[in-house]
Image (cartoon, rainbow, N blue to C red):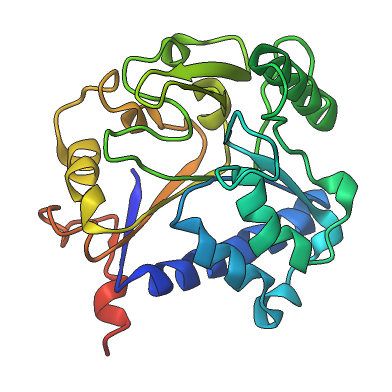
Amino acid sequence: MAEIIVCRDVDDLSRRAAAEFVRSALESVASTDRFAVALSGGNTPRALYSLLAASELQDRIPWPKIHVFWGDERCVPPSHRDSNYRLAYETLISRVPIPAENVYRMKGEEDPQIAAFDYEQSLRKFFGLTDRGLPRFDLIFLGLGEDGHTASLFPGSEVLREKKRMACAAYVKRFKSNRLTLTLPVLNNAANIFFLVAGEGKASALRDVLQGKDNPHRLPAQRIRPKKGRVVWFVDEAAASLLVNLSSGGVDHGLKENQN
């Protein structure tokens, strides 16, 4: 069962997600001597990344043991304003002592099919995989689009049917552009998945994904159901405004806790 943590606003959401990041990182490093995380793009993670880079939290994180990947990427150069890598680099990576060799970006400037293939090879090498294995990320950050998409898994996309590949190129009709994305088998093999959802513009999609009818082809975020993993939804009050029965189990009323 997914956990829902309702937060006061984006800043509160970011603080709580950052605390969970630190806890997960320390736990993984203690048990496996490394922490593999896949980052997301969009506006919501910006404050989170800045918090992780701030001295209060930065000093608690064993950065040489942290390995950073991406859940998806726009097919643009890394210096482009729309690049998910650029967002993470400017707000986090350039501000912390993480070794350059621990950063595995998706190369959005290359041919999409080649870039997806190369990223899969990087995953296989890092995780020491055979032909049939899947990477086991310690943590994957995901967002939620107003249309119900997550990563670059959009409604109706052929990539939603992918069962063998770890990373794919996906043409998004809505934006008339290509994206790179991890596939559902990889996402659903993660140990932890943290959704970050903020703003009233996401309220309808959040309600439909969490409390609406099961329609995973129209709402790809409903497909995130790890068999042996934890899913936590960090949502702000505005995004959660259409959810009902939040007093039931699995809900952490961070909103109420932080108002006391």
- The quarter of the rendered structure image containing the C terminus is bottom left
Residue 138 is drawn in which quadrant?
A: top right
Between residue 22 and residue 143, name the one nearer to us: 143
For the point 67% across and 29% down, the residue is 108
Place of residue 66 in the rendered image (x, y in percent of width and height, measured from the top left)? 77, 54
Counting from the top left corner in percent of width and height, residue 116 is at 67, 19
From the viewer's perspective, tell me whether residue 42 is left or right of residue 25.
left
Q: Residue at x 79, y 45 (%)?
A: 103
Residue, x 20% and y 50% (percent of image)?
203
Quarter occupied by residue 209? top left
Number of marks in the rendered image: 0
Left or right of 159: which side holds 97?
right
- Reply above or below: 20 against 36: below
Can residue 135 be seen here? The reply is yes
Q: At x 18% / y 37%, what residue is drawn?
A: 208
Q: Position of residue 239 (x, y in %)?
A: 24, 57
> 245 or 12: nearer the eye?
12
Quarter where residue 255 is shown: bottom left
Determine the residue located farthest toward the bottom in the rendered image.
260
Quick check: 108 left or right of 222? right
Viewer can see residue 38: no
Quadrant the N terminus occupies:
top left
Up-down relation of residue 53 to residue 131 (above or below)? below
The spot of residue 174 in percent (x, y) is 34, 24
Between 101 and 107, the residue placed more toward the observer is 107
